[in-house]
Image (spheres, helix red, strand yellow):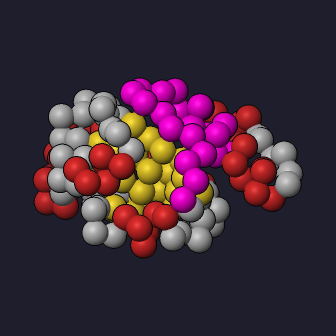
Amino acid sequence: MAYMIILVFLHSKMTLGPMECFAKTIEVNDKNFEDLVQNAPFPVLLHFWSESDWTHPYMVKFLEKVSKKYSDKIKVASLQVDKNRETAGLFSIEEVPSVALLDGYKMVEFFKGAVAPQTYIEKIENLLSEKTGTQEIVKTDSEKLSA
């Protein structure tokens, strides 16, 4: 049974491609970056990745959880740096993974390299509490997302 599940997962990844397995995640490229990220009505968590990034499968799972949990408060986006060098250059991407938390044209936070999932959650929660004027950091919810 476990083998069948793994094969189905691998088949769906090969059929759909690396970005289409994201739930509610925006695929950003050089052409749509300004419209989808800088002009977004919500803050955006932007993940920079490449085909050679060994952390990418783990980030996909984590970003799916973030996207579902915060779907009405932030947008989660991903940019493949090898195919979108112009946008990656705006952020001086030197290594992947890198993640930027953006609010319009303002960079709230930038993470270089592998970072603990809890760190992303804390920064998202801090930004959202600043925007709403409340402190709603719930440790149990953050721990669930980072698991």
Relative image position of residue 135 (x, y in whole percent): 84, 45
Quadrant of the rendered structure where residue 77 is? bottom left
Q: Is residue 35 above or below residue 93?
A: below
Q: Nearer the viewer, residue 47 or 104?
A: 104
Relative image position of residue 18 (x, y in whole percent): 22, 52
Q: Is residue 111 magenta?
A: yes
Q: Is residue 10 above or below residue 110?
A: below
Relative image position of residue 93 (x, y in whole percent): 33, 38
Which residue is rendered at x = 36% and y = 49% of the image?
Answer: 90
Would residue 6 be found to the left or right of residue 65 on screen?
left
Quadrant of the rendered structure where residue 6 is? top left
Would residue 82 be found to the left or right of residue 88 on screen?
left
Q: What are the residue bounds of the magenta stretch?
A: 105-125
Note whether residue 18 is visible.
no
Which residue is rendered at x = 49% and y = 64% of the image?
Answer: 38
Please state, as top left, top right, bottom left or bottom right, where the N terminus lies in the image. top left
Would residue 9 be found to the left or right of residue 142 on screen?
left
Q: Is residue 18 magenta?
A: no
Which residue is rendered at x = 57% and y = 40% of the image?
Answer: 109
Would residue 73 be found to the left or right of residue 57 on screen?
right
